[in-house]
Amino acid sequence: MKQQIINTLSILCIFSMSLNAQKYFTKEGTISFYSETPVENIEATNYKAVSIFDVESGAIEWSALIKAFSFEKALMQEHFNENYMESSKYPKAKFKGVIQNIADVDFTKDGTYALKVSGSLEIHGVSQNIENEATFVIFEGAIRGVSNIQVKVRDYDIDIPSVVADKIAETVDIKITADYQEFKK
Amino acid sequence: MIRILLPFLSLILSFHSVLAQEDLLSLIDEEETTELVTASFKTNRIINLASLENTAKGVMDFKINHRFGFLNSGPGQAFGLDNATIRLGLDYGLSDRLMIGIGRSSFEKTIDGYAKLKLLRQSTGKRTMPFSVLLHASTAIRTIPFQNPDRENFFSSRLFHTGQIIIGRKFSEGLTLQIAPTLVHFNLVPTAEDKHDIYSVAGGGRVKLTKRLALNAEYIYVFPDQLAPGYRNSVAIGFDIETGGHVFQLHFTNSTSMIEKGFIAETTGDFFAGDIHFGFNVSRVFTIKSYNKKAK
């Protein structure tokens, strides 16, 4: 009986720990994408992406406003929002996933940690399961997350008419950087 | 008792913890931002009328505007295609709110310049603004010789001024409407009976048919007893076709002139009697200065 009470308490403890598990977040994550073709190179950056991850479970989430991507040319930005991403209909791109080997990361020790991340990436209202590599660089307590993703435009039902097909790459490179801060409720 | 409760407890707790992980992002309070409503029209003109959109900051817009002759001029004139008046123009966005433009029209050899300022910009989010309000001022200089060279003629007699307050709203992705109380001022009028100031209200809008195709229309109501007999209200209807860096506007209008004083106060064509010009505006934008590259 006593044993069981202890069991219960310890389970309770573990759960309450995981409930309050440490989290890190940023509101100023950077997402850049590059479309390179012989005709035209297009790049855009969003400096206001939001991300949070849970040290215990490895759960990680990202969210970025499509309208916050800024382009070199104003017209590109207008077409990106109006014609391709339809940002008034689909205002955000989101990622929800898990860092599978979060247990390998020692947040108290400086170093570079290779991560395996899997989850669901939602762009233009279409969700696709993806798996990708990422890195945590830990230096004097600061955590920087970095990842490069390649996204096929067609996978997300983004319609590119044939007249501009040679100006927009079929696969777009996406670079993600986040300097995480400790999350305090 | 505990033995019975234990699985339930752990089930509830684990469910709870799963829930907690379900929505990590909801833990972060996102700051609400103000989002400006963009792309109300494809370009800074509806057809003849200035639209509530400006040329973007640092961007130059080269305009090639054509109006052919009247459709009812018959097969001998290739239904108007043999005659054309043209306006070449350059527009430039000085800031997010202010644009300027110049142009020259073959019709009466007129040079015009204008400025358009966004006073209020339609927005959603933190600061909600239901509509946009713009000020538009233009001046035209007629460079053809004076009709009466013996009289003492002043340079100011060549000038025409237009002032406009544009109030508009993008109601949805598909629908934008605007209305613009307008004053056209003639420094010199042909006869003493002609008015120097012409008051009118210009209305225009667009219906977006597909992502790259829109139907535009505009009508200018000139208040009665201001125009000499034979002048009519301007009406125009046409399509915007967007292809990458170009916007092609193809339309039908009863106005020959492509500047305010001309199409508002000097339209002679009777649209419903077939005095219709087929016309087009070609807009080509060039990014002169890029501001967005290092946004941080």
Image (cartoon, coloured by chain):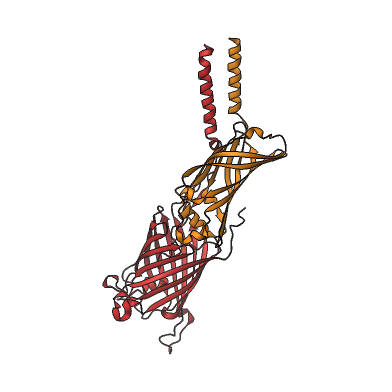
Question: Exactly how many numbered labels are in the figure?
Answer: 0
Q: Is residue B44 left or right of residue A149?
A: left
- Residue lying at 64% horizontally and 32% vertically, measured from the top left: A103
Q: Nearer the viewer, residue A60 or B58?
A: A60
Q: Nearer the viewer, residue A76 or B116?
A: A76
- What tint does the image give chain A? orange
Furthest toward the left, the residue is B273
Determine the image quadrant of residue B234. Answer: bottom left
Residue B158 x %, y %: 45, 79
Q: Is residue B208 left or right of residue A91?
A: left
Determine the image quadrant of residue A139. Answer: top right
> Which chain is the one coloured red?
B
Furthest toward the bottom, the residue is B150
Q: Is residue A1 left or right of residue A108?
A: left
Q: Can you see residue B67?
A: yes
Residue B89 x %, y %: 48, 72
Q: Nearer the viewer, residue B179 or B33?
A: B33
- Residue lying at 63% horizontally and 39% vertically, measured from the top left: A115
Q: Can you see residue B49?
A: no
B84 w.r.t. B283: above or below = below
B186 w.r.t. B132: above or below = below
Furthest toward the top, the residue is A1
Residue B209 x %, y %: 37, 57
Determine the image quadrant of residue B59. Answer: bottom right
Residue A47 x %, y %: 59, 49
